[in-house]
Image (cartoon, coloured by chain):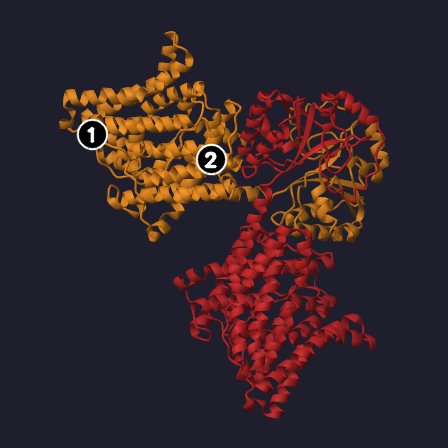
Chain colours: A red, B orange
Amino acid sequence: MSLERYLPVFDWGRRYDRAALTGDLVAAVIVTIMLIPQSLAYAMLAGLPPVAGLYASILPLALYAIFGTSRSLAVGPVAVISLLTASAAGAVAVPGSAAYIEATVALALLSGAILLAMGLFRLGFLANLLSHPVISGFITASGLLIAASQVRHVLGVSAGGGTFPETIQALLVALPETNWPTLVIGGATIGFLFYARSRLPYVLRRAGMPERRAALLARTAPVVAVVLSILAVILLGLAGRGVAVVGDVPRGLPPLSLPGADLALWARLLPAAFLISVVGFVESVSVAQTLAAKKRQSIRPDQELIGIGMANLAAAVSAGYPVTGGFARSVVNHDAGAETPAAGAYTAIGIALASLFLTPLLRNLPVAVLAATIIVAVLSLVDFGALLRTWRYSRIDFIAMAGTILVTLGVGVEAGILAGVSLSLLLHLWRGSRPHVAEIGQVPGTRHFRNRLRHDVAMDPSVLSLRIDSSIWFGNARAVEDVLQDAVAGRHRLRHLVLNCAAVNSVDASALESLERSRARLADQGIALHLSEVKGPVMDRLARTDFIEHLGGTVFLSHHEAMTALAPDMTALADAAPRPVIDARRPSPERPALPD
Amino acid sequence: MSLERYLPVFDWGRRYDRAALTGDLVAAVIVTIMLIPQSLAYAMLAGLPPVAGLYASILPLALYAIFGTSRSLAVGPVAVISLLTASAAGAVAVPGSAAYIEATVALALLSGAILLAMGLFRLGFLANLLSHPVISGFITASGLLIAASQVRHVLGVSAGGGTFPETIQALLVALPETNWPTLVIGGATIGFLFYARSRLPYVLRRAGMPERRAALLARTAPVVAVVLSILAVILLGLAGRGVAVVGDVPRGLPPLSLPGADLALWARLLPAAFLISVVGFVESVSVAQTLAAKKRQSIRPDQELIGIGMANLAAAVSAGYPVTGGFARSVVNHDAGAETPAAGAYTAIGIALASLFLTPLLRNLPVAVLAATIIVAVLSLVDFGALLRTWRYSRIDFIAMAGTILVTLGVGVEAGILAGVSLSLLLHLWRGSRPHVAEIGQVPGTRHFRNRLRHDVAMDPSVLSLRIDSSIWFGNARAVEDVLQDAVAGRHRLRHLVLNCAAVNSVDASALESLERSRARLADQGIALHLSEVKGPVMDRLARTDFIEHLGGTVFLSHHEAMTALAPDMTALADAAPRPVIDARRPSPERPALPD
């Protein structure tokens, strides 16, 4: 059992049959074809020689096949992680230098170790610190950043990078030096790829092709662009006309070597490695869960950490760089019929074969074409619709999302993630410090109590019923005290205050003291404090103190019991009254309170 | 109205009458007598010449009388703030140097400005970041730190300071050099003061004195100790026998001067000044609220910020150092009959007179006696009982309290407060990320639903009722998904899942997506998802999305309605069954779940 737990290959491996083999092989062929240009492009995005992308797609995939739990996930270089890698390595070394490559390998090593540790110690929940609006905003901003950083390759100019405004500015300055053949090739590729994404599947289906095959075929468009552009460069001699090409790509399998232990470098890269680990894990797990749900399968997040961790360690020893499960490649893998993680292992073999035999063919591949594939791929990540939907649903989540986007574009990727996490946590704390307290009354004809500002309810002038819609903790304890105090001000006929605690999920030590102070103050004013519908866990704790003995008032099991005991006449009338029609689906808006 | 709001003196000043004048004058006399040795002692604790304590008790008190809202609060140097001042100034200058004094004045200026800004911008809620366990732990640890730092004055040795272990170690090393006359004087004073605190009020009451007067008289014990020790030094020539004395205390009123603008120094001191402001505000407001409650008065925390801020600015221009409302002096002020803040102004005059005329008499005051008054005063702040009570009530609050104590003792005061705030916020977030979800059933004979693990309830095998005892946010959204998934696993007869949302106070954007995913997964498994008792604010938001349309299931107003609709037979039986006796005061413990 333990072996299967940590090496899932022994789980699905035992049931491997011919059908699975066929599905996996077919998927591997398709994914390999798709991955070759993509790996080269993402390596370029990471500031590395293109062959690093191929290396990062061989051994890591194989190790994920042994340790991972997702049947559909395809692991390798992805856009956002390549961006984070470039940012981190660029901070400690000059892009293109040996020190830079050493830094990317170190990032893969550190990231793998961190992921492995998180998996073994079950720290996967740390990924929950990234709320969905923050992730979405970060990916949107990253998409814009990446696309902007690739435009110079399409224009054939050299322009600086940096923050989004800086990149745009540098591009505008460099515009006059545009190399026209490069722009034509790059622009045509962009146009072709966008067409392939949006119109081609429809055209193929109209021509009679089944939907799934049409979609897969459309996804191989980048390969077509690569082949056609290589031919164009060779036949039209474009390399001599200013079109930058990939150049010589080393033949052969990745060199295996243990990275040197440079503790000073590791210390500098550790924060970035941690970010890469968490972002990579979050992206990978969400892809894996989405695809697993379609097939009623499930994944184990803590084992996924181990799987991706081992993949990154493999990248570190095979001249790769940080990797994770990618969305596009995993969807293709899934749709192409992958049955088990073995598909990933076969893909690794396919890429290895490509490194051995196909790489000389890539010499004349225009860089602009690789950049075009990146631009088209990441612009599909940009989701401004999510911004609008979040604005409509929750201003707080919108602030976190917009803040993440602005800081990522304006300062950088690490700052953007940190700003997003901090903002969302601070806003969550702030929201929890402003308790919603509703004065409730009886809905006639029922034993149910609702907000007087939303429903026509029956109330008694000698009993005030307040429902506290929040756990009480030190951040809102004082506010709750003030609300209680304000609520009884001026109500001279009041003799009882019943706190409905159905929504009070916890009462911490500071809150307990606040309640005690409130009780004393109310007692001074001749008002008895009662509680109703106190939850089990809360009552467990309160019972360990003398709060209940000092309460004076009663703890009622239900609010209706409380009102029956304290205002029997009003309650009897309300019980017997006709029941109004309330549609629970249509929320009743809060109306201004009528004077008593 | 606006004038009275920001200058409360115009509020109570208009109703000033002879009775108030008498009460205030009497209180002022008593407090002045008590404050003289205390101010000298606390200045020494802050590493300043004793006269700084007197200066800090004159103009600041007068300004609080104009701007403050508490009728009983007495403002001036207090133990914990003196400690924080010594720690902050000692980090930027050598104690005793001119630069050190300049730093303490700068701290008062910065602290005053910060408090003023917080008051004007209504940022008083920031003080809620300090939970009561953290404050209590910090004060306990500070008390121990301060007492340890004063022991060397009682022994008459010179020993280093630093963290608590370092201080204890230095004392042990310096023990052999104890000066016996100093130890005798200091020890006798400590003994006398402890007797005066604990036994003397009882003895005086037995002798027929009214309780309040007995307590007040006992509080003037430090003055008696001062007078007697001065006489002893003069008559026995103790100064020549190694007993350190206060020495020359300058006569005269505090010199008024604007502190120079040293931006570099201010930048270094700003964090400490912020801590001093927040701690001072928290201590002062809690004292003020406690005393105001006894007289059915109220204070306005945002105006209190302005009052104490102005007091600190006054200290900065009159050679003082950071001040705030003190517990002991305010209690004495209150018990001695202060009616209005004017009592503070009269006290200021009293201390000014003392600075003009009494200071020559203090030349022979032994430092050991001042140290003894500090030791006795702060040891009363140490509250290990709170530690035990918090352990019993809430482990989380205990961890925050214990962590604060350990870091304050082991590292320092600033680190201690920061550790406390961080720990309590992190623990609060952690607690919120582990949602309690209860499977509920109907309590027979009622329309009430409770946890099946705590009560005997009726349930139907085709309907699963889950009550989520938590707001759903990004920190716990995934956990909620997992709980829902695990809850339905293996229950083949299940057709409906009703989520009781009575305790779900908010659903953020990430949570909305989680619920949508859960709904889809349940639908795949042939289980319909319904909601019951959704709160108004939550429904408002959900209605702005298409979640409710896609729900498939129904939103019920009450859980009983849900069960009546989905499991009518079971519900009818349960409605008619006899009602069990449940004592809501005695929490039913969770029992292990019986097999279905």
Q: Are marks 2 and 1 in contact (CB under 8 Å)?
A: no
Q: Please determine whether, in this image, residue A117 is positioned above or below residue A354.
A: above
Question: Label 2 sits on what residue type?
Answer: Leu
Instruction: Select label 2 or label 1 by which is in front.
Output: 2
Q: CA distance from mark 2 to mark 1?
A: 42 Å
Q: Position of residue B122 (x, y in %)?
A: 52, 42
Q: Position of residue A205 (x, y in %)?
A: 81, 74
Q: Please determine whether, in this image, residue A401 is positioned above or below residue A326.
A: above
Question: Label 1 sits on what residue type?
Answer: Val
Residue matched to label 2: B7
Badge 2: how crowded within 10 Å, few (<14), some, or many (20+)?
Answer: many
Identify which residue is drawn at 59% across, 47% down: A428
Instruction: Say whether disc 2 or disc 1 marks the residue closer to the N-terminus.
Output: 2
Residue reaching furthest to the front: B14
Q: Is residue A299 left or right of residue A54?
A: right
Identify which residue is drawn at 65% across, 41% down: B470
Q: Is residue B444 left or right of residue A355?
A: right
The residue marked by circle 1 belongs to what chain? B
Secondary structure of the residue carrying tag 1 is loop
Q: Quadrant of residue B212?
A: top left
Q: Quadrant of residue A78?
A: bottom right
Secondary structure of the residue carrying tag 2 is loop
Between B401 and A420, the one lying in front of the other is A420
Give a yes or no on whether discs 2 and 1 share a subunit. yes
Tell me if I can see residue B488 in this picture. Answer: yes
Between A118 and B46, the one lying in front of the other is B46
Residue matched to label 1: B245
